[in-house]
Structures are given as C-alpha cells and as structure tokens.
Image (cartoon, rainbow, N blue to C red):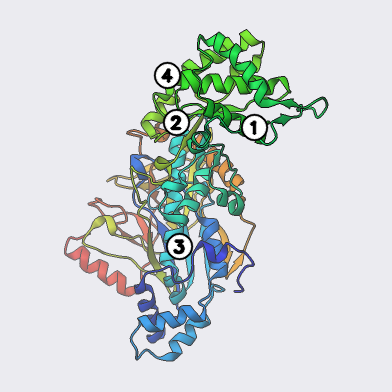
Amino acid sequence: MAAEQDPEGRAAARPLLTDLYQATMALGYWRAGRAQDQAEFELFFRQCPFGGAFALAAGLRDCVRFLRAFRLRDADVQFLASALPPDTDPAFFEHLRALDCSGVTVRALPEGSLAFPGVPLLQVSGPLLVVQLLETPLLCLVSYASLIATNAARLRLIAGPDKRLLEMGLRRAQGPDGGLTASTYSYLGGFDASSNVLAGQLRGVPVAGTLAHSFVTSFSGSEVPPDPMLAPAAGQGSQVDLAASVEMWLERVCGHLGLGVQEPHRGERAAFVAYALAFPRAFQGLLDTYSVRRSGLPNFLAVALALQELGYQAVGVRLDSGDLLQQAREIRGVFWTAAAQFGVPWLQSVPIAVSNNIDEEELARLAQKGSEVNVIGIGTSVVTCPRQPSLGCVYKLVSVGGQPRMKLTEDPEKQTLPGSKAAFRLLGSDGSLLLDVLQLAEEPPPQADQELRVWPRGARESRTVRPAHVEPLLRLWVQQGQLCEPLPSLAESRAFAQQSLHRLSPAHRRLEQPALYQVCAGPRPQPGLCCLPPWPHHSRVSLLQVALSEKLQALVDRLSARGAL
C-alpha cells in the first residue's frame, strides 16, 4: 500500500515505535513459513477507567494514518538487523523491506463512540506477521487517546453544558507527543479549545490564550508606548491616546471603588494598556498578579472603559489563584455596580475565566448553581489523568487461518474470547441504551422486536431482552489497505461523542458509583457449536458460541473432564 501523502502519517507513530518482541516473533513466523497466514486480532479494554461505567473510543484517525504510511525504511531494517542475532537469514530483512499494510483490514468503533469492557475498539486482520507487528503502535495510539477523551468527557459532565472548558496542560504533559495527543482528544471529549498551537495547526483544534503573569510583571509603569494612539473601532474618527484616557478613567473607577488613585499598580496598568493596544477587540485582564481588589480590578475597569469610549468591548478577566469561586462572585458584583455607575450594560456579563490546578472536586465547586465563573482552564488534571494513568488496552489474537484462538491462563481476568466477532448495541423504544451483545461474526444478527437470550458479563444466569432497535457497532474502515469511507473530522467526532454521552442513562453517566452497563454474549446456542467461559468469575459454562478447531475442542474436553470449565 502506498503511503498516504499526509505529514502526520509517520508523525502519528513510526514502525519501530514498538516492542522488540514483535520483531522477534516476526522472525519466528517467517522462519516457520507462517508470515502470510491470515490472522485477526482484537483491541479492547477490560475495565472502564476512573471507576466509571463508560469510555469513549478515540485514536482511530491516528491508527489509519499510521497504517497507510507504514513502511520500514532502510535505517529501520538496519537497526533491526543489529538487534537480532547476527546469523539471522538476510532474506528476512528483505522481507521486512517489502512490508506494508496493503493486506490489512480494520473494523472499529467510530471515534467518539461509547465503549465498554470486552467490546473491540479495533478488529485488525491480515497477514500474521504484519498484524503482529502492528500490536504495540496501535495500542499506543488508541489507549492514551481513549483515556484522555474519557477523562475530558467526565470533566465536561461535571462542568455542565454551559461552562467553557479550555485545555492548557501542554507544559504538564508527558512529553511533546503526549501533549499533542492530550490537546487533540480532550477536544474530542468535550473541551472547547486548547492552548496548544501545534494542535491547532495539525489537528484543527480551536486555540485560545491571552497573557501570563510574566507579561504583567515585565512592566514597571515607566515605559512609554511607542504609539499610544488607537483609532475608534468603527474606523472613523480621530485617534485617541489610550494611555492618557486610561489615566482619566482610573480616577473615576477608584472613586467608585473607594480606592486611592495610587493603589493600583502602575506596571500592571501599563501591561494592560500595552495588551489593549495590541488586541483592542480581544482585551482580557489577568487580575491577580498583585491584588485583585486593589489593583487588578480597577486597572482592568479603567482600560475597559477607555476602550468602550472607542467602541471596543473587553472580552473577559482571568483569575489564577485564591478562592476562585468567591472571588468570581465579588468581581461579578463589582461589574454590576460599575455597569450601572458608568452606563455600560455589557460590563455586567463580562466572562470570568479561572485556572489553577483544577481537579474534578474543584471543578464541581466552580460549576455549582450560582457560580459566576464562565470559563475554566484545566491542565494537569486532564492531560495526566491522575486518577488512572492508563486504560489498560490489550491486543489479542482471536483467529488464525479461520480457526479460533484463545488464551487460557491462570488468571481468569486474562482469558480471551476466541473467534471473529460482531458487536451490536440494543436500544429501547425511546432510544435508550439497553446493553451490548458480542457474538460470532457468522451468526445472524439480533433483530428489532424479536426476543433474544443473552448471557451478561459476570452473571450466572442468562436474561431475555426484546430490543426496539439494533445498531451494529463495528464499521469497516480499511479493507485490504484501502480506506473504505472518509474519516469524520475531529469536530464531527467531538459532536458524535456528545450525542453518544447524552444517550447514556443518568445511572450509567453518574461518575461516582455508577450502574454498570451490561455487555452480553449471545445469541442462543446453535447445533455443533461449543461453549467457552468468556467472562471472568463465571463458574458455569458460558454460552458464547465458538466454532472450535479439533485441537482446541480436545483441549476444552480435557479441561471439562478435570472440572476446569
């Protein structure tokens, strides 16, 4: 498959961004003559993150870009030759040079889909050697993206629909790649914008940012603007010396606030004037460099009112320390009285932005009813996912040559479900989500308004359900290396994620002690099919029907005789 002309293709991940054992297994497959055996892997997670009941699927776009650009370059092959035994057959390295993903097929949940334990996020099929080499890069691309998107979705649910959420965690992220991924997928999960300029350039994420305390403290007040003149917003009329106008307004503002005209910091005021001259249509004041009440607020009002005379409107203020909720209430009160005093109604509704190590608990406080906070910037808590740093996705072989494969392990949690599968979401008549069903791909799909017997994960008994609607979950995105349909844009995936979350019941959407969403095996057993134990802690024979090879069937028979099934 020819590499797509996409500058992000190799940026998403390089072929050697992998574990060495993928290369050693590739050599083993090649030496055994099995490189071209058709195989299928599934990528999924075992538990929902953060103690919640859902996750958001993300990273598909990066995976497709990676697959379309996948090719081992000479330098890659040369390094592998240095890492593998010196007597490795040179023909193996020639085989590696010719590899691409032209034989790879990918089915996946669309980005922004609700995802639940055990349901594949990706199904990857193709030549055994190639799809084995894809394991680590695909896990890397999907796991962190999905974790970030889910974390961002939780924060959005806490904030509610009306607060504006800004991701500003690049400086706290785990390296440049982690920073770009976090900025991209926090937007997909529900944030409104990012401070990360590269995420805007490469991914189309809306970017936002104003000024830091360093900008304010760099001014002493003795600076003279090279050009303090500002023209009216309408473009007609005489220019005005903004710095001089601000000084006149400061007297009136200080009189209104009961402050001495010398109390507000001169350097801070000079910084505000400089910023207003650069951004008269987007002036925002950072209020807490010195004192919010005695300096930041009067200086902001003086500049905002001077701009108002020229037809400009300040866009907001920001707080970065102290009791953010209480200060926002006090500032809003001052804005109301100043709006009445100076006849400027829009001052009442100037947006108040806050930041400062905001986590889920502080976010809930800032989002409570009656809060005057409008914009919330979050960094560390969104990009580092402190409550759970990894989603724990796995990539497991489920079939080779059309024959199912499974992992029987000492740890029931790590048992895998063999065979190529289909996944469906069953819905009620009101569109509510009932449960997800996994079954063999060749079995007839569930039908709307027909009774279906299923076996819930972790349950000892089956249950019967009659869905009003049935949705297939896994879509074909790449077939034999070719893109089957255009990938949605990031903005479209973001909108789809919000729609998906709204379909969850309040009990499943609850962030603390939520009701668990059911993933079930089905349908009813068919003649000639064997039953395996797909769900952990299931003491009885499960009823996920898997057509087994003779060898695996014999193994199951031996285990059954020993009472292991």
* Viewer-proximal residue among 445 and 206: 206
Check if mark 4's residue and mark 3's residue have beta carbons within 8 Å. no
Q: Secondary structure at mark 4?
A: helix
Q: Secondary structure at mark 3?
A: helix
Check if mark 1's residue and mark 4's residue have beta carbons within 8 Å. no
One can see residue 514 in this view: yes
Crowding near the residue tagged with mark 1, few <14, some 14–19, many ≥20 C-alpha atoms within 10 Å: some
Q: CA distance from mark 1 to mark 4?
A: 25 Å
Tell me: residue 503, above or below residue 25.
above
Crowding near the residue tagged with mark 3, few <14, some 14–19, many ≥20 C-alpha atoms within 10 Å: many
Q: Residue furthest left?
A: 562
* Apparent side of residue 462 relative to residue 411 in the rendered image (left or right): right
Q: CA distance from mark 4 to mark 2?
A: 13 Å
Residue 462 image point, x, y percent? 33, 45
Identify the residue under disc 3: 138
Lower sequence index among marks 1 and 3? 3
The residue under label 1 is which amino acid type?
Ala
* Apparent side of residue 277 relative to residue 479 in the rendered image (left or right): right
Disc number lying in front (2 or 3): 2
Disc number lying in front (4 or 2): 2
The residue under label 3 is which amino acid type?
Leu
Identify the residue under disc 1: 282
Lower sequence index among marks 4 and 2? 2
Identify the residue under disc 2: 320
Q: CA distance from mark 4 to mark 3?
A: 46 Å
Mark drawn on residue 326: 4
Q: CA distance from mark 1 to mark 3?
A: 41 Å
* Viewer-proximal residue among 195 and 202: 195
Q: Secondary structure at mark 1?
A: loop
Crowding near the residue tagged with mark 2, few <14, some 14–19, many ≥20 C-alpha atoms within 10 Å: some
The residue under label 4 is which amino acid type?
Gln
